[in-house]
Amino acid sequence: MRTTMTFLLSWCSSLVAAILVLRICPVRAQLADQQAMAVLHDALSVPDWGPRDSDYCSWRGVTCGGPNGTVEVLLLPHRGLSGNISPISELRSLKKLDLCANSFHGLLPPFFGKLTELEYLDMSMNKLSGPIPLSLGALRSLRSLNLSNNLLSGEIPGEFGNLGGLQELHISGNNLSGFIPRWVGDLPYLRVFSAYENNLEGRIPENLGSVSQLLQVLNLHSNRLTGPIPESIFAGGRLEVLVLTLNELEGSLPPSIGNCSGLSNLRIGNNRLAGAIPATIGDIQSLTYFEADNNNFSGEIIPEFSRCSNLTLLNLASNRFTGDVPAELGALKNLQEFIASGNSLTGGVPRPLLQCRSLSKLDLNGNRLSGSLPDDLCNTSRLQFLLLGDNSITGEIPREIGDCVKLLELQLGGNHLTGNVPPEIGSLRNLQIALNLSFNQLEGPLPKEMGRLDKLVSLDISDNRLTGRIPPELIGMLSLIDVDFSNNQFTGQIPIFAPFQKSPLSSFSGNEGLCGDPSNLSCDISAGSGAAAAHRKVSSKMALAVIGSGLTAFTMVTLVVLLFMLRERQEMAAAIAAGDVKKVPPAAAAAAATGVFVEHLKQAVDLDCVVRATMKDENKLGGGAFSTVYRAVMPSGLTLAVKRLKSVDGTVARHRNRMIRELERFSSLAQPNLLRPIGFVIHEDVALLLHHHTPEGTLAQLLYGRAGGEFLPDWPRRLRIAAGAAEGLAYLHQASIVHLDISSCNIFLDADHNALLGEIEISKLLDPSKGTASISAVAGSFGYIPPEYAYTMQVTAAGNVYSYGVVLLEMLTSRAPVEESLGEGMDLVKWVRSAAERGEMPEQIMDPRLSAVSFAWRRQMLAVLRVAMLCTDPTPATRPRMKAVVQMVLQAQKDSTP
Ligand SMILES: *[C@@H]1O[C@H](CO)[C@@H](O)[C@H](O)[C@H]1NC(C)=O
Ligand SMILES: *[C@@H]1O[C@H](CO)[C@@H](O)[C@H](O)[C@H]1NC(C)=O
Ligand SMILES: *[C@@H]1O[C@H](CO)[C@@H](O)[C@H](O)[C@H]1NC(C)=O
Ligand SMILES: *[C@@H]1O[C@H](CO)[C@@H](O)[C@H](O)[C@H]1NC(C)=O
Ligand SMILES: *[C@@H]1O[C@H](CO)[C@@H](O)[C@H](O)[C@H]1NC(C)=O
Ligand SMILES: *[C@@H]1O[C@H](CO)[C@@H](O)[C@H](O)[C@H]1NC(C)=O
Ligand SMILES: *[C@@H]1O[C@H](CO)[C@@H](O)[C@H](O)[C@H]1NC(C)=O
Ligand SMILES: *[C@@H]1O[C@H](CO)[C@@H](O)[C@H](O)[C@H]1NC(C)=O
Ligand SMILES: *[C@@H]1O[C@H](CO)[C@@H](O)[C@H](O)[C@H]1NC(C)=O
């Protein structure tokens, strides 16, 4: 052996041999890679890789490089893969390895340390456990390391060797403990360090950022870090995102933060930070989100905030701020939310702030504001939340309150308001979340106009001096869940109205003169004395109590309250529909899970707004068998389609985590004809899926939508849609995803009239094979259901082909799959397939307004008709596969030469 080696070496030193080496060594490297890839092929069984012995360089996700054809890039993200990945260690030329979002488990393989050429390693979103192996420290070419969202534990290795080139380090969402080691701060090129949601403790290294000077993103939220925010992180002046929420940090916010003029996102809430906010904040021109709630900051709110013209959110709640709200803040044109509840602010209701034309939320609950409510409260603003509870506001509620037509929530409880409740309150037709006038000195009767607040969920007018009868008109408040009329001087009968009778006694107590259910005084004319069920009072406060911080979405708290109401309302509706007034909704409230998959949309999506949109019927765009779709316009101007899943038997609540994983996978499917999810909100049994809005509507609308409108001879467009939908479906089938509801209503059109197949995620979210939904719920839409479903009870790829065939027939005939004009007991498929028996020619089936336009169109239509006939064959096994269907449709498209 040794002799051969020596021999080889000496041999190689000659010139002639050098040429041979150039030929031989490559072949050897290639052999090693070939072998490794063959083993990997067996180990992972990647669905769309070619045969084991085919050229691995052509397999999907594999890129070979160099003259010797070695594997340099291996990208297999979001493929549901598991198995042994150790063969990868033989791919010595590997530069980029992405296996994120699969199901690899067990220890993180130490052999990765052998891949010394590796520049990019992404193993995030798997189930890897155990410690981070020290051997990774040998990856001297590594620039980006992503191990986030696994189950890694133990400490971050104290010394990590040769990682000097590292630019991005992501280890968030694990269970790592111990300190952040100093070497992280010594990395000269570090730009992104993300270690949030771990168990890290100790101080943030004092050198972090000082060596690199390139630090742009530092995200360490939800750990147990202590000590101060080190000034070093501001030294480079490049910081763009700083998130330190939910730690135990102390000390003050260093003034040098003002050097980071590109900082847009600053979140340091839920720590123990103290001192004044430095005036240098005003130098941060890009500041968009400033969140410092639940700390121990003090001093006045600095007027310098007004220089941050892009400021959208300013959250200073639960600190020890004093003084007046500076008038300068009125200049903040982009300010949407000003939250400063739970401080000791004084002065009047800040009128200048009300002039911020984007302001939608003003939260000054729990301060020491005095003076009266300005009567130009809502001249200019788009205020949706006006929260001024628990202050010392005096005077009357101005009649101009009626101008606040956008309000969703009005909190004025716990002040010193006097006079009557003005009838104009009935103009606040959008009030949904709460109207709270409790603990004031309001008097006189309640205006009957209040009954017009038909969306309001919570009404609290307790502890005032209101008199007279409870106006019977209040039965117009159809959405009420939570009412409190207690401790006033109301008299007479409590109106017969389910939300009232379902309320606890205490909602009406302390009113000597009230009678009827649910008070314990019966009226003379006893009406409907049926025992009102003890309605467990589910207050939104419970939801609030469970939520620790609003980090994921900056308005998480309102989000959860909204979701809570949404669920309540659904259950109320269901209970009322079922005549079951006693039904008590489950009281548990947990945090919502939310996510936005598309990085550049993260800030444009306002989840509050998403939830609110689903509460209004006028936003309804339509619905399929499994969901209702709403239109939601974000404050950023972005329009989304929000799909509310119809949960069957608590599916959403029970399979939440799996659903989130599936959604992530679907979000990354790379095929242009699929309408992929871009985000989600899941709370208890409510699941909202976010998609891009498709203003061009659906194929069904294109085919049948323009009632009375002009008919457009648009065969080429239809054919292009047919091809796109086929390609999308074929892609799904290749990824082993069966669609549950192929129909022309689920084929959406983008601005260029390309087909986008919708409802693609439903099968995995409500997968019948996993027992999460019953077959009766997933059979698809009427007219598209293949005949075999009647006895197989199984949704299959072949069944999809049938439904697709029906869609083709719709395009050819301009007829709906079930239509009375087809005749008794006929659906479109039967009608077309029995044409020959009736002695009809194809021309008599196809829409003559299209087929008569040109010979080319007619020929194409005949070709597509043949495809449709194959697809709708009664025998599933005889139908072509989608891949073949794509070919046939594309072929038909090409057949346009005369
Ligand atoms: C690939 O070939 C180049 C020269 O063509 C050589 O320098 C390199 O070492 C080879 N790579 C491997 C991994 O053998
Ligand atoms: C992992 O981090 C890299 C940057 O290092 C990033 O490009 C990639 O998107 C991350 N992966 C996931 C799944 O977030
Ligand atoms: C995380 O690690 C700690 C020890 O550091 C352990 O007690 C805990 O059970 C782990 N949590 C999970 C979810 O693995
Ligand atoms: C950073 O900010 C501090 C305090 O605001 C200031 O003294 C210092 O000169 C600034 N450094 C740079 C490089 O601008
Ligand atoms: C403010 O926001 C706009 C829009 O996002 C952006 O174009 C602009 O650069 C920002 N201004 C500053 C000073 O960052
Ligand atoms: C906040 O600061 C005050 C003194 O400035 C101190 O008495 C108090 O304990 C601090 N609170 C917390 C929670 O650290
Ligand atoms: C509201 O409108 C009135 C009259 O139109 C005007 O006098 C007042 O200044 C306005 N208030 C605000 C805050 O714009
Ligand atoms: C109404 O406001 C008062 C005072 O802020 C508060 O105590 C009460 O809990 C609020 N009512 C509801 C239903 O939230
Ligand atoms: C209901 O009855 C109890 C005594 O049984 C009494 O203390 C209470 O004041 C009554 N409540 C009302 C609303 O009349």
Image (cartoon, rainbow, N blue to C red):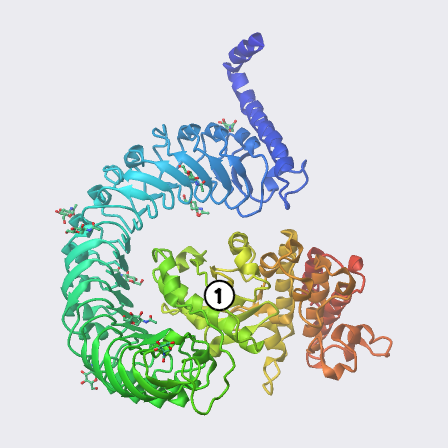
Q: Is residue 571 left or right of residue 763?
A: left
- Residue 302 visible, this angle: no
Asked if 485 appears above or below 599 in the picture, the reply is below
Asked if 155 appears above or below 523 in the picture, the reply is above
Q: Position of residue 256 (x, y in %)?
A: 17, 48
The residue drawn where x is 60% and y is 76% is 702
- The image quadrant where one finds the C terminus is bottom right
Residue positioned most to the bottom: 525
Q: Nearer the viewer, residue 594 or 505?
A: 505
Residue at which label 1 appears? 692
- Residue 712 visible, this angle: yes
Disc 1 secondary structure class: strand
Q: Position of residue 516 (x, y in %)?
A: 43, 85
Q: Position of residue 340 (x, y in %)?
A: 23, 64
Asked if 788 appears above or below 386 in the picture, the reply is above
Q: Quadrant of residue 194?
A: top left
